[in-house]
Amino acid sequence: MTTLQHSAQSARSTRLNRSRATRTTTGRPVRTPLQPIRRIAAYGICTDDEGRVLLVRASRRSSTPLRWSLPGGAVDHGEAPTDTVVRETAAETGLSVSVVRLVDVQADLRAVASRGLSIHTDRLIYEVRVRGGALRDRIGQTTDLARFVTLEEAARLPLRAFTATALGLPAPVERLPDDTGSLPSFHLVPGPDGLPRAQRFAAYAVATDPRGRLLLTRIADGYPGAGHWHLPGGGTDYGEQPGAALIRELAEETGQRGRLLHLLGVASHRDPASLGPEGYPIDWHGVRAYYRVVVDRPTRPRVHDVGGSTSEARWFPMSRVARLPLTEVTREALAELDAQTRGLTGSTWASSRN
């Protein structure tokens, strides 16, 4: 089962399972409240000429000691996830890689009781290929070994759950927090330059109906991009899968019930001095996954989340879309949709721009 299929099936219950008590190595439930944190990370699936996949082992310094995973790590503030994959793979394996394509987007929630943390991670999985370098191990770092292994060999290793899922192998059960607390998708932290900064993960829909119309929302006054038309969607909640978040946001912003088809792409944008309803500039970094969605039974759009960032929602014929004031991520998503469908059915979006 793919992550997208799992997300669609869990749309009625958007939160990851939080009811299981976290247990220590002695089997005792963890009762101490954990500090919730969020992070965005990017990883690479890299194979050699023999079809073996590249994995790295976490050292004893890591919060997941001696577990194997895809090479990768946390996306720095303002960094493109594709650059993260290249940087982290070089650091952890000694290999220089280039990104081929986006494969999947996952989210998971786990407890690190020894550090008093509950961690929600949004993970972007890419296919990468080797350009150069030489495989090497590391000493005194959070990963220590790097190896190419067959899938049969990988299945016998203690894998991180997200890695097993990405490779199509049975995934081990991660330890889940008993009480996660809460943390908004929009979470400010102090920046080194004095400006508050926020890194936010969000999911958006390129949603059409059986007539080929595109569903768009208009950004309300007082928000960055006010007056521009935007894809329906928004920030994922703490412990929420991106696909499920998208279905929730679609209903809240437009009153429509959507059906997820597939992942289209990921956009990463930084605005170092974004001015919104807070009344002061924020160094903003948004990482947005956008999906292809179909609304089988469209209705007249209605904004249920009154007073938020969406002022109205509307269905548009695709021939009119290119003449609208669109947000940057909306143009990127439509261009990606055009690229993926060109040569199959033609593209009204592409022809309407000419």
Image: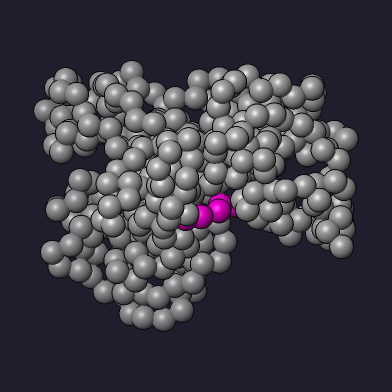
Task: Specify whether residue 190 is in view.
Answer: yes
- Give the residue drawn at x 56%, y 52%: 266
Eyeballing the image, is 116 above or below 69?
above
Residue under the point 29% across and 43% down: 189
| 195 lies left or right of 271 | left
Q: Main secondary structure of the magenta part?
A: strand
What is the magenta range? 263-270
In the rendering, at what x and y percent does residue 231 appear?
66, 40
Quadrant including the N terminus: top right
Which is more toward the observer, 242 or 17? 242
Please say whether residue 328 is one of the residues in the magenta stretch.
no
Nearer-the-camera pick, 307 or 354: 307
Q: Count up the numbered dots.
A: 0
Q: Nearer the viewer, residue 257 or 320?
A: 320
Q: Is residue 280 above or below residue 307?
A: below
In the image, residue 267 lies in the stretch drawn in magenta: yes
Residue 290, position as x, y percentages in the image: 61, 45
Left/right of residue 53 with respect to residue 220 in the rendered view = left
Question: Among all residues in the image, which is located at the extreme front?
Answer: 279
Q: In which quadrant of the rendered view does residue 137 lie?
A: bottom left
Locate residue 339, reporting x and y percent. Answer: 73, 59
Is 48 on the left or on the right of 294, as rendered?
left
Quadrant for residue 354, please give it: bottom right
Indicate the colouring scheme. Answer: one colour
Q: Position of residue 115 (x, y in %)?
A: 15, 38
Asked if residue 157 can be seen in this view, the reply is no
Q: Is residue 260 above or below residue 320?
A: above
Residue at the image position 46 percent from the left and 60 percent from the top: 80
